[in-house]
DNA sequence: TCATTAAATCGTCATATCGCGATATGTTTA
DNA sequence: TAAACATATCGCGATATGACGATTTAATGA
């Protein structure tokens, strides 16, 4: 990410994809798919420290994936662009294709043993 | 990626997204969208060393994104699942939404100055 | 105003990633 | 079989990332 111009489409693509390529952040997005939640609700939902969750939320925010608003002493986060959920479903589709392929290979192997 | 079970859907999702979250690899995929190419063609198309390109290709291969076949002394790589191209288009759509949003903000700012 | 609560930020480890040159492996060709 | 070619792999330095506890910032409420 060094030779890239900040704000270029390639740079944005990488920023979005990097933000998504972490298991905790994917689970947070899954959790937020239900709707807006405050940090105080998100923290207990995951086995991570407050500072870790806060950092993950900020990464998703900086990548333009989450939006946030402050309400009193709480901060509420929500998915900014619902298109991101479609994107994640596409990732799932690719992952499921890979699993199906493995299962096929397994069946063929089993059949060849018998 | 520590508490995850290898082969789980979450693990696969992260593996796919991590493989995609690098500018060189995104450009390689863009290049391979045209069709199968040998490593000897891919290397000169990018400002990276042979070993670096080879490693990037292997990461994409390990993530199940590319397929490869050996033909004589060359290795040919191609996109395995065309669905990955749809996925990348979705990423672009999100990135373009973000650019559009920035441009809107710019227009509003400009108008407020005048 | 002082204590409490909520969240962000800082400092620091441990680990992962990217890049490169050097080297190893394998294939064709002379 | 030796030289040349194509690619993968190794080893290493520089930088990035993720995790945590401690600290800071900010708002509320007693």
Image (cartoon, coloured by chain):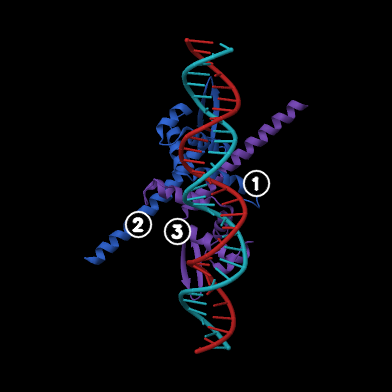
Chain colours: A purple, B blue, C red, D cyan
Q: Of tags 2 and 3, which is closer to the observer?
A: 3
Q: Left or right? Give the position of B107 relative to B26.
A: left
Residue B102 disc label: 2
Q: Left or right? Give the position of A84 relative to A113.
A: left
Q: Are marks 1 and 2 in contact (CB under 8 Å)?
A: no
The residue that label 3 is drawn on is A62
For mark 2, name the chain: B
**Is residue B98 at all visible to an observer of this figure?**
yes
Q: Secondary structure at mark 2?
A: helix
Quarter occupied by the C terminus of chain A = top right
Name the one closer to the observer, A92 or B62: B62
Picture quadrant where residue A63 is located: bottom left
Expressed as whole percent of the image width and height from the top left, the position of residue A41 reads 58, 67
The residue that label 1 is drawn on is B8
Determine the residue positioned at 70% across, 32% down.
A107
Q: Are marks 3 and 1 in contact (CB under 8 Å)?
A: no
For mark 3, name the chain: A
Determine the residue positioned at 76% across, 27% down.
A113
Q: Of tags 3 and 1, which is closer to the observer?
A: 3
> How many numbered marks have been drawn onto this rendered protein structure?
3
Residue B114 disc label: none
Q: Residues within 10 Å of mark 2 (few under 14, many from 20)?
A: few
**Is residue B36 at all visible to an observer of this figure?**
no
For mark 1, name the chain: B
Disc 1 to disc 2, how far (Cα)? 37 Å
Name the one closer to the observer, C29 or A15: C29
């Amino acid at each position: 990410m060094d030779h890239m111009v900040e704000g270029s489409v390639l740079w944005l693509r990488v920023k979005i994809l990097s933000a998504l390529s972490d298991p905790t952040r994917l689970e947070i997005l899954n959790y937020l798919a239900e709707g807006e939640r405050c940090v105080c609700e998100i923290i207990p939902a995951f086995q991570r420290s407050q500072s870790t969750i806060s950092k993950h939320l900020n990464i998703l925010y900086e990548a333009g994936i989450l939006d946030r608003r402050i309400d009193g002493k709480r901060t509420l986060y929500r998915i900014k662009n619902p298109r991101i959920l479609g994107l994640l479903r596409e990732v799932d589709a690719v992952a499921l294709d890979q699993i199906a392929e493995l299962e096929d290979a397994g069946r063929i192997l089993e059949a060849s043993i018998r």
